[in-house]
Image (cartoon, rainbow, N blue to C red):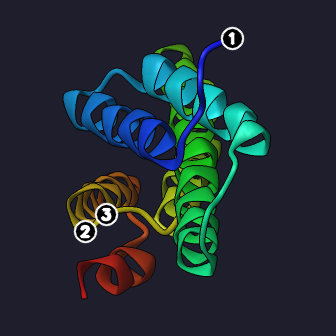
């Protein structure tokens, strides 16, 4: 059996964030899911580690949600059947609590899509 420690889960989470930065969303989703599955196998030694693990779980859940939204949005873009749904998914991704760089890219993406659609009021909201 492989030992599962807080540090190994944290390393998997960092790897998932790096994959997100590279734009490999399916691999990132896979990495975050694997890390989240192994959380139940961790033996914690202090209450401080428990708080850190809870914060890490929250971060991983947010990234999993964001990656699922982005993968679904990427599927709809080439089909070009429902641009409103694509813009809606881009807006939903801005609600995910990610690192600042990723959140900025989500806001920029939503702004660009809404501006191109002619929805200037909502685009101005994301620009602010």
Q: Residues within 10 Å of mark 1 (few under 14, many from 20)?
A: few
- Tell me if 70 is positioned left or right of 85 in this view: left
Q: Which residue is mark 3?
A: 99
Nearest the viewer among 67 and 108 is 67
Instruction: Give the number of the mark in front: 2 or 1.
Output: 1
Residue 100, numbered circle: 2
Q: Nearer the viewer, mark 1 or mark 3?
A: 1
Image location (x, y in percent) of residue 77: 48, 25
Image coordinates of residue 43 in percent, x first then y, are 69, 49
Vertical order, 10 against 97 (above or below)? above
Q: Vertically, is 13 above or below 24?
A: below
Alpha-carbon neighbours of circle 3 within 10 Å: few (<14), some, or many (≥20)?
A: few
Q: Is residue 125 shown to the viewer in this render?
A: yes
Q: Position of residue 80 (x, y in %)?
A: 52, 23
Among the two numbered marks 2 and 1 on one chain, the one whose residue lies closer to the N terminus: 1
Residue indicated by mark 1: 1
Disc number for residue 41: none
Q: CA distance from mark 2 to mark 1?
A: 37 Å
Of helix, strand and loop, which one carries label 2?
helix
């Amino acid at each position: 059996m492989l030992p599962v420690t807080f540090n190994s889960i944290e390393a998997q989470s960092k790897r998932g964030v790096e994959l997100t930065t590279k734009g490999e969303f399916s691999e990132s989703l896979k990495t975050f899911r694997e890390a989240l599955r192994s959380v139940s196998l961790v033996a914690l030694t202090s209450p401080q580690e428990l708080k850190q693990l809870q914060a890490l779980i929250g971060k991983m859940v947010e990234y999993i949600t964001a990656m699922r939204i982005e993968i679904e949005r990427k599927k709809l873009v080439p089909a070009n059947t429902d641009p409103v749904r694509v813009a809606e998914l881009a807006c939903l991704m801005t609600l995910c609590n990610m690192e600042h760089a990723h959140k900025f890219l989500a806001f920029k993406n939503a702004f660009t899509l809404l501006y191109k659609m002619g929805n200037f009021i909502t685009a101005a909201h994301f620009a602010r």
